[in-house]
């Protein structure tokens, strides 16, 4: 099988520096963070800033390095390079939580909280997770009255820098019986290539995967929580099936010629997506274990995100405000995705034959 993806359009208000994270939301907007210290929201149908009448949060003086958007698309958690974590209400435009993990007091260094490098919202709200130099995962309160306060620490047992952490949207028990989304498991990747999966209900380490030889930059869960896709500086992606843990690794995807910086899995679990420092985006057929499309970009690709299930430009509140219907940014057929990279431009791509 071979698929073709076409460039649909770009955002109308680019960042002034590299985009280091982005996510396509169920409301058909895209949230992006940048090395210029800013966070923006863009309407997928046109690439315009959204909402048009609300300002974005003030840019931070240092780079934004981590982003996590709630499953309902109403909140965005983002984190700067020195560990300033903020919670943005996407409906009101207000920053409703702010935590300096590098500072003493309020659960900071003196209370065992290290500066955050990567952050992830619990899909049910209430808490968020972070990781950093210790290689552990810290669970924080996401409540407004005590935002950032440490709730628990999940030790990996390895003193390696934590590169990425991610809650699953749907979770599994240690016996691999499926349950409704409960935010009880989280994956962590480190600078030496190891991947850890924790049960946050028991604070126990559930699985350890040693699939990579170099730092793992990104992790992506499938919507049913059975698959975990990792992207590494060793130029590979590895697919893990948690049902076959502790071995876990069931496929390796090669083809990039430089670091793989980002990864995602489509909502139906059929396709993987990766962005690389080699200036390409690749689409992978997960069942066939093969690359089915390569998109040449103009700069290093630091972030990619599939269009989420249920996202419809014509049916979203954002589109209603804009008056656009099923624009090129929506895409159909093989799907649609968004990317961001070194040039600071958010780009929408659609499957050939899509609207």
Image: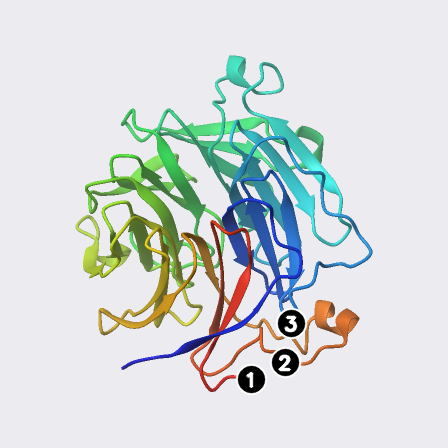
The residue located at (38%, 79%) in the rendering is: 4
Q: Residue furthest bottom?
A: 353
Q: Quadrant of the N terminus?
A: bottom left
Residue under numbered circle 3: 45
Circles 3 and 2: CB atoms closer than 8 Å:
yes
Residue 134 or residue 45, whichever sits in front: 45
Sequence order check, earlier mark of 2 and 1: 2
Residue 159 vertical placement versus 237 (above, below): above
Report the front residue among 178 and 300: 300
- Would you say 208 lies left or right of 143 here? left
Q: What residue sits right under mark 1 in the picture? A: 355
What x and y, as percent, mark residue 168?
A: 43, 52
Q: Left or right: 88 with respect to 188?
A: right
- Spatial CA span between label 3 and label 2: 7 Å
Q: Is residue 121 visible?
A: no
Q: Between marks 2 and 1, how big is the CA–CA gap?
A: 7 Å
Marks 2/1 in contact by CB < 8 Å: the verdict is yes
- Residue 108, percent across and down? 56, 19
Residue 326: mark in rendering: 2
- The C terminus - image quarter: bottom right
Side of 183 where 229 appears, left or right = left
Query: Callout 2: 10 Å neighbours few (<14), some, many (20+)?
Result: some
- Mark 1 or mark 3: whose residue is earlier in sequence: 3
Where does residue 133 sit, x and y in percent of width and height?
Answer: 39, 25
Q: Residue furthest left?
A: 247
| Residue 57 visible to an observer of this rendering | yes
């Amino acid at each position: 099988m071979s698929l073709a993806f076409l460039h649909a359009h770009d955002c109308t208000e680019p960042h002034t520096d590299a985009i280091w994270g982005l996510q396509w939301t169920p409301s058909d907007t895209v949230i992006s963070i940048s090395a210029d210290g800013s966070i923006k929201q863009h309407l997928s149908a046109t690439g315009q800033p959204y909402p048009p009448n609300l300002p974005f949060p003030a840019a931070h003086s240092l780079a934004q390095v981590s982003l996590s958007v709630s499953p309902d698309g109403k909140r965005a958690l983002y984190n700067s390079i020195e560990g300033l974590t903020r919670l943005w209400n996407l409906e009101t435009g207000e920053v409703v939580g702010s935590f300096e993990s590098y500072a003493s007091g309020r659960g900071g260094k003196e209370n065992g909280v290290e500066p955050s490098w990567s952050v992830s919202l619990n899909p049910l709200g209430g808490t968020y997770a972070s990781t950093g130099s210790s290689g552990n995962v810290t669970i924080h309160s996401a409540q407004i009255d005590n935002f950032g306060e440490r709730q628990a620490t999940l030790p990996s047992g390895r003193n390696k820098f934590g590169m990425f952490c991610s809650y699953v949207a749907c979770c599994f028990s240690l016996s691999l019986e499926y349950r409704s989304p409960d935010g009880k498991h989280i994956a962590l990747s480190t600078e030496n290539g190891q991947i850890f999966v924790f049960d946050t209900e028991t604070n126990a380490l559930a699985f350890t995967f040693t699939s990579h030889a170099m730092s793992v930059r990104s992790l992506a869960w499938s919507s049913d929580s059975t698959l975990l896709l990792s992207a590494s500086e060793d130029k590979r992606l590895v697919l893990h099936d948690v049902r076959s843990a502790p071995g876990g690794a069931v496929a390796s995807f090669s083809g990039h010629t430089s670091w793989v910086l980002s990864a995602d899995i489509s909502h139906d679990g059929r396709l993987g997506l990766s962005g690389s420092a080699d200036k390409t985006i690749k689409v992978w057929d997960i069942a066939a274990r093969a690359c089915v499309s390569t998109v040449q970009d103009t700069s290093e690709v630091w972030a990619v995100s599939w269009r989420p299930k249920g996202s419809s430009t014509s049916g979203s509140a954002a589109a209603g405000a804009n008056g656009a219907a099923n624009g090129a940014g929506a895409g159909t057929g093989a799907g649609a995705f968004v990317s961001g990279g070194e040039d600071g431009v958010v780009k929408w791509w659609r499957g050939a034959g899509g609207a």
